[in-house]
Amino acid sequence: MKLIGNPKLKSGGSILLIPVDSIIPNPNQPRKTFNQSELEGLASSIKHNGIIQPLVIRRSENDKFELISGERRLRAAKIVGLDTVPCVLMSACDEQSALYAIIENIQRDNLNFFEEAESILKLSTVYGLSQHEIAKKLGKSQSSLSNKMRLLKLSPELRAVITDNLLTERHARALLRLDNDVDRLKVLLHIIEKKLNVNDTDRYIDNLMSPVCVKPKPKFKKLKDVRIFINTINHAVDTMRKAGIQAVSTEHETCEYYEYVVRIQKMTSSPVNIADYSGNAV
């Protein structure tokens, strides 16, 4: 690339026309899904205007080049049928290639939150970067990275359902409040069926975790005061006494029941024997 004007300006790298068939995908590409209609729209733009922003590549084996960034442009170029695409050749190791791919997608908001979390995890586990280093390179806070990586506690099946139904990251975080994927799936299907927003989802999970105790309605009408019956017994005992019958009553109360005993003296002049009578009022 020839510089025009100020000789102090430096070139950032020559733009090369590389055969499409010589470019292999980036194995560290964080983006897993590509919207076909969006690719076709990009292909239409490329057909009329060309590729304005070059792809970034690095050398690979067997005279091939590995894509660092620009996979959407490469896919769209194949749809159009281009033989070559403009590229900038960069010298980058595996770690740098993975990092550049993630940064490009994050800056363009091309990654969904699960893809972003998986990319961050890969930088940590495969390339040994600390959360502090990743946060610094991506321009994010460590707490933000931690929240992203927590999303990977959801099973791949749950992540697919969340993504397919265009639910938000906050929906996914709300599901993490539940202890297992079985309960999470039940709640997730309810969210989708009822089309719950995030606030409604939080309230629904709150109720599941702390259900409101609803007392069942009694089958029978409760008595307001057992004393009504005890007074009836006392009245009967008083009536017997006034009639000359020797009657004695005793009352005993526990936490479970009332015990009421009426003892009636036998009348020797009567041929009829009246036995002791005991009654319990519960």
Image (cartoon, rainbow, N blue to C red):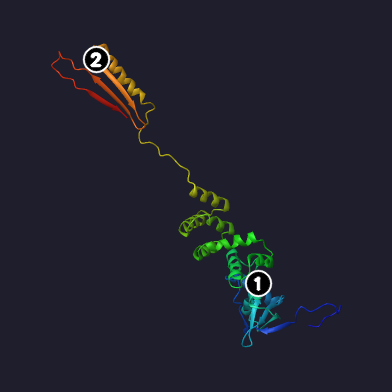
Left or right: residue 158 compared with residue 99: left
Q: In the rendered image of this protein, does residue 147 appear above or below residue 4?
A: above
Q: Quadrant of residue 91?
A: bottom right
Let me know if residue 23 appears in the view: yes
At 60% across and 63% down in the image, what residue appears? 113
Q: Amino acid at mark 1?
A: Leu
Q: In the rendered image of this protein, does residue 22 appear above or below residue 210?
A: below
Residues packed near mark 2 inside 10 Å, few (<14), some (14 to 19) or many (20 plus): some
Residue sitting nearer the eye, 134 or 69: 134
Q: Quadrant of residue 79?
A: bottom right
Q: Nearer the viewer, mark 2 or mark 1?
A: 2
Q: Position of residue 194 (x, y in %)?
A: 51, 53
Let me know if residue 43 appears in the view: no
Secondary element at image label 1: helix
The residue that mark 2 highlights is 246
Left or right: residue 275 compared with residue 200: left
At 60% across and 61% down in the image, what residue appears? 146
Q: Earlier in the sequence, mark 2 or mark 1?
A: 1
